Amino acid sequence: MLRGVNRVFLGLVGLVLLVLGGSVLAVGLGVSAPSWWIHDSRHDVLLSEAERTRWRDSGWWWPVVIAALAVLLLLALWWLVAVLRRHRLAEVLVDTGDGEGALLRGRALEHVLTQEAERIDGVDRSRAHLKGRRTAPEAHVRLALEPHVDPGTALTDFTTGALQHARTSAGLASLPAEVRLRAVKHGAERVS
């Protein structure tokens, strides 16, 4: 849902900036503007001298403006970091037992979890993603089950098989997992 909100927000901000910038550019190039528009001619300025100096004598004006701009900048930077943050775990720290550690690619562990889950009887497709920290990863797995399989059995087989093997091979004390199960819908086949 956050991705959808980001896209809608970015689209609206982009549209507003495009309309405002395009209209200012059009007026600057000599296109006549409607009577209600903020600019009248190509020699009109964005802020007149009276508008710029209106609050100059008030001691509170410039600190408020600077504080508001600083808050807007911090919010924009926070939002940018939240959008650009990686949602997948790039690597997992494996305890080698000799006081050192090794790094295991997160995609490799995801691939192994996916392949081993697909070998379970009744699992048609699977997809695994690792999230969290590299010292404490969390698995997010989706299993597409055949119509004849019992979901409880498939979940037990996954946790005691693929998930246990991944936890043991990576030397992790625990590997919490969120497993989402769904049934595969097959279309009717024509038999001739």
Image: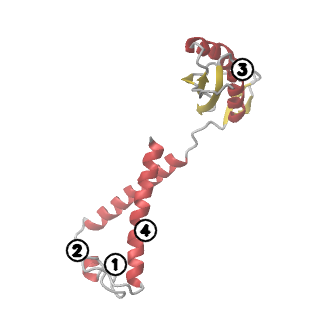
- Per the model, the C-alpha gap separating discs 3 and 1 is 67 Å
Q: Can you give x and y, in whole percent of width and height, for residue 134 in the image?
A: 63, 32
Q: Amino acid at mark 3?
A: Arg
Mark 4 element type: helix
Relative vertical location of residue 36 with respect to residue 90 in this rendering, above or below:
below
Q: Amino acid at mark 1?
A: Leu
**Pair 2/4: label in front:** 4
- Per the model, the C-alpha gap separating discs 4 and 3 is 52 Å
- Per the model, the C-alpha gap separating discs 2 and 4 is 34 Å
> Tag 2: Cα neighbours inside 10 Å, few (<14), some, or many (≥20)?
few
Q: Which residue lies under the disc numbered 2?
A: 57
Q: Residue at 67% of width from left, 22% of height from top?
A: 117
| Label at residue 18 | 4
- Per the model, the C-alpha gap separating discs 1 and 4 is 16 Å
**Of 60 and 91, which appears nearest the observer?**
91
Q: Earlier in the sequence, mark 2 or mark 4?
A: 4
Q: Earlier in the sequence, mark 1 or mark 4?
A: 4
Name the quarter where the N terminus is drawn.
Answer: top left
> Tag 4: Cα neighbours inside 10 Å, few (<14), some, or many (≥20)?
few
Q: Earlier in the sequence, mark 2 or mark 3?
A: 2
Mark 1 element type: loop
Residue 191 appears anywhere in the view: yes
Q: Earlier in the sequence, mark 2 or mark 1?
A: 1
Q: Which residue lies under the disc numbered 3?
A: 119
Q: Which residue lies under the disc numbered 1?
A: 46
> Tag 1: Cα neighbours inside 10 Å, few (<14), some, or many (≥20)?
few
Q: Residue at 69% of width from left, 35% of height from top?
A: 107
